[in-house]
């Protein structure tokens, strides 16, 4: 290691070995692997000298070592932290910005995987596969035309998407092109012309919940979106509609969803994210035979894991070389980073 080498710390492993390969080929970047069960003193010592901190998935990353203010204050040389995927809600972004630390994510790397997961949930629910699977397992004689168990085609139905970014736009394309669905979307950060380019019609939040046969969430967890899907939103939905989320817990009100299902306000739900993860046995949503549950794995596939790791590695090379990264979450920090990078690493910023 040379005097000007930059140190990148990560826990256990990247999502795919390609990250270590890409970074290993870069000049003057030293990788330090930490074990989640290592002694706190050893972890603290590694982070104290680290220039970069690669995070694991939120459900796997050690809680005591999340990049919150106390951890950040113990990392005087830290220049950036990177989330594994698109989400970065376990990072104190404001605290990072105040300390001149960049926050980056890897949005887009697993977009196809998440969109396909949401589409799969939509199919399972509309075709009544959950109820039918249980019926086949427990009954010898089955009336395939029993009222309430006949599946519904998605053709000509309406899909409502909240958040028409990388994932939402891919789901819109799948729904319109493959299923012949009408797609409507709510995204206050897009211009009107953007919706047509992304295979969707722009509507307001209330209209989306009232008109959709399926609602799918694809927005980040922020102060603005926390609790956005509440009891009032569920009451607007059709009794035949399905609610799907592969976004983040706390965006929807879990208690309100349980009540909506129990009261028959909606026909079913597909849930990949929870307030507390993993949800553990006894979660109230487990009591329903019209709810499909997966453990926050919508973006976990062979292709997505490799792409997240590769994309993350290339972005780290940019960051630790003094370049502006392509997926900077807190752009206001850039001037402070430009000042800190040469002072800490001894290497100039590359414009």
Image: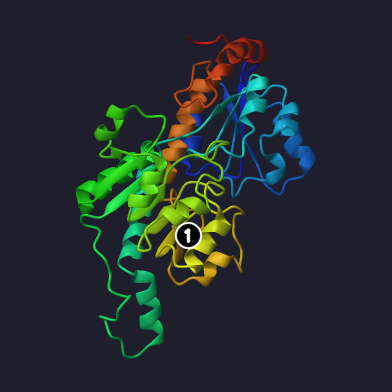
Indicate left or right for 163 with 53 as reference: left
Residue at 66% from the left image edge and 15% from the top image edge: 344
Residue at 35% from the left image edge and 76% from the top image edge: 132
Q: Is residue 346 visible?
A: no
User: Residue at the bottom extreme?
Assistant: 140
Q: Assign a secondary structure to mark 1.
A: loop
Count of marks overlaid on the render: 1
Please name the colour scheme applied to the rendered image: rainbow
Quadrant of the rendered image containing residue 339: top right
Observer-nearest of 144 and 133: 144
Residue at 28% from the left image edge and 69% from the top image edge: 151
Q: Provide residue 180's location: percent of width, then percent of height.
A: 20, 51
Q: Where's the N terminus, which quadrant?
A: top right
Quadrant of the rendered image containing residue 348: top right
Q: Provide residue 107's location: percent of width, then percent of height.
A: 44, 35
Residue 125 versus residue 80 in the image, above or below: below
Q: Provide residue 324's location: percent of width, then percent of height.
A: 49, 17
Q: Is residue 55 visible?
A: yes
Indicate left or right for 93 with 206 as reference: right
Observer-nearest of 351 and 289: 289
User: Residue at the right extreme?
Assistant: 41
Q: Residues within 10 Å of mark 1 (few under 14, many from 20)?
A: some
Task: Give the residue at mark 1.
Answer: 294
Residue 166 versus residue 241 in the image, above or below: above
Residue 189 versus residue 56 in the image, above or below: above
Q: Provide residue 18's location: percent of width, then percent of height.
A: 45, 39
């Amino acid at each position: 290691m040379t005097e000007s080498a930059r140190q990148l710390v990560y826990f256990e492993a990247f999502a795919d070995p390609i990250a270590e390969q890409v970074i290993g080929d870069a000049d003057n970047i030293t990788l330090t692997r930490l074990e989640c069960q290592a002694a706190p003193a050893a972890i603290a010592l590694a982070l104290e000298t680290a220039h970069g901190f690669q995070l694991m998935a939120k459900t796997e990353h050690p809680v005591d070592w999340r990049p919150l203010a106390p951890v950040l204050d113990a990392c005087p040389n830290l220049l950036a932290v990177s989330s594994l995927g698109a989400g970065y809600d376990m990072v104190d972004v404001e605290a990072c910005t105040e300390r001149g630390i960049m926050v980056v994510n890897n949005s887009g790397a697993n977009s196809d995987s998440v969109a396909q997961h949401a589409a799969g949930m939509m199919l399972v629910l509309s075709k009544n596969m959950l109820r039918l699977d249980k019926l086949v397992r427990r009954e010898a004689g089955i009336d395939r035309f029993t009222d309430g168990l006949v599946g519904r085609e998605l053709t000509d139905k309406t899909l409502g998407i909240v958040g028409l970014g990388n994932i939402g736009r891919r789901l819109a394309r799948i729904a319109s092109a493959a299923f012949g669905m009408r797609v409507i979307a709510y995204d206050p950060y897009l211009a009107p012309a953007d919706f047509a380019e992304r295979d969707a019609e722009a509507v307001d939040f209330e209209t989306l919940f009232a008109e959709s046969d399926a609602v799918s969430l694809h927005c980040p967890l922020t102060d603005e979106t926390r609790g956005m899907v509440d009891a009032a939103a569920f009451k607007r939905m059709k009794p035949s509609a399905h609610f799907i989320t592969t976004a983040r817990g706390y965006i929807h009100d879990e208690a309100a969803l349980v009540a909506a299902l129990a009261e028959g306000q909606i026909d079913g739900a597909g849930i990949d994210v929870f307030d507390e993860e993993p949800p553990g046995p006894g979660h109230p949503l487990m009591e329903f035979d019209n709810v499909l549950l997966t453990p926050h794995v919508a973006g976990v596939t062979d292709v997505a894991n490799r792409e997240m790791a590769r994309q993350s590695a290339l972005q780290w090379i940019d960051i630790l070389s003094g370049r502006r990264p392509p997926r900077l979450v807190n752009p206001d920090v850039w001037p402070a980073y430009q000042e800190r990078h040469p002072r800490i690493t001894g290497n100039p910023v590359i414009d």
